[in-house]
Image (cartoon, grey):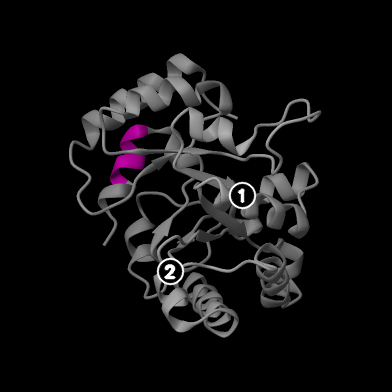
């Protein structure tokens, strides 16, 4: 919940100045709903892509305050973030509702960024994989995946979001390898190897290169550092 329309447009202009060429990277901007349309128009002149921060699974109806998948498509979104830890923690998101949203996003041709992650007490109780396996199994329940139309999965340990704490590159890699193994067992090796796995949790320019150099980490989901175009550009440039 950051940036007015004017601030979002200023951010895009500054980021475009900082990152004049994207290369082989996918760089995605996820502003609040109020700034999606204006940001999408501004991004049309760039190589950056647009994402919604959330969406409902129904197409229309008596769901006051919600946003339908078609609304996101209408304003130019390519991606949508689903199951973010803050949605789970503060707004009642469950594995079942993530599954509903995931199905709807894929029906509408949006690329989902499915978030999973454990709380500090769950990590300290050595329940990290138990929690992640439940979240992954719930999110993808009954879903068939096409190797040419795959979602992204973002591992974001809740204890490392906005706290200044970061999973070490080794800790992050260990969990990403577990996620890759889970995908191999529940889908197949082709899909497991093609799905891009992202790390989120106090990512900043000083640690992004080492995080993204890990074997099973394909990118990052950036939080607070993304509000500064210079920092966000530095993180984008650090992708290996």
Residue placed most toward the observer, 232 or 110 = 110
**Residue 133 lies in magenta, yes or no?**
no
Find numbered disc 1 in the image and state the secondary structure of the residue it sits on. strand
Residue 189, percent from left and from top: 45, 83
Is residue 84 visible to the viewer in this orientation of the structure?
no
Q: Earlier in the sequence, mark 1 or mark 2?
A: 1
Judged from this view, the residue extending furthest toward the top is 6
State left or right for residue 120 relative to residue 235. Answer: right
Q: Which residue is at a point 31% across and 48% down the rendered structure image?
A: 236
- Position of the N terminus, as image quadrant, is top right
Magenta stretch secondary structure, dominant: helix
Instruction: Give the quarter of the image for residue 72.
Output: top right
Please name the residue shown 49% across and 26% down the image: 36
Q: Which mark is residue 82?
A: 1
Q: Is residue 39 above or below residue 187?
A: above
Q: Which residue is mark 2?
A: 147
Query: Which residue lies at the image location 77% right of the left edge and 41% below the top edge?
Result: 91
Numbered range of the magenta stretch? 229-234
Disc 1 to disc 2: CB gap under 8 Å: no
Q: Nearer the viewer, residue 224 or 10?
A: 10
């Amino acid at each position: 919940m950051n940036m007015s329309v004017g601030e979002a447009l200023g951010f895009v202009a500054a980021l475009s100045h900082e990152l004049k060429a994207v290369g082989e990277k996918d760089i995605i901007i996820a502003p609040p709903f109020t700034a999606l349309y204006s940001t999408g128009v501004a991004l049309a002149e760039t190589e950056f892509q647009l994402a919604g921060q959330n969406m409902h699974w129904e197409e229309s109806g008596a769901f006051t305050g919600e946003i339908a998948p078609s609304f996101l498509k209408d304003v130019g979104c390519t991606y949508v973030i689903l199951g973010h830890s803050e949605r789970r923690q503060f707004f009642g998101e469950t594995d079942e509702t993530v599954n509903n949203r995931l199905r709807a996003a894929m029906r509408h041709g949006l690329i989902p960024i499915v978030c999973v992650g454990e709380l500090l007490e769950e990590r300290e109780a050595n329940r990290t994989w138990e929690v992640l396996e439940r979240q992954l199994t719930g999110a993808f329940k009954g879903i068939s995946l096409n190797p040419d139309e795959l979602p992204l999965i973002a591992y974001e340990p809740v204890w490392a979001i906005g706290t200044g704490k970061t999973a070490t590159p080794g800790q992050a890699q260990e969990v990403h390898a577990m996620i890759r193994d889970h995908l191999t067992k529940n889908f197949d090796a082709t899909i497991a190897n093609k799905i891009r796995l992202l790390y989120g949790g106090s990512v900043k320019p000083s640690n992004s290169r080492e995080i993204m150099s890990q074997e099973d980490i394909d990118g990052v989901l950036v939080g607070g550092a993304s509000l500064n175009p210079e920092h966000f550009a530095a993180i984008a440039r650090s992708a290996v």
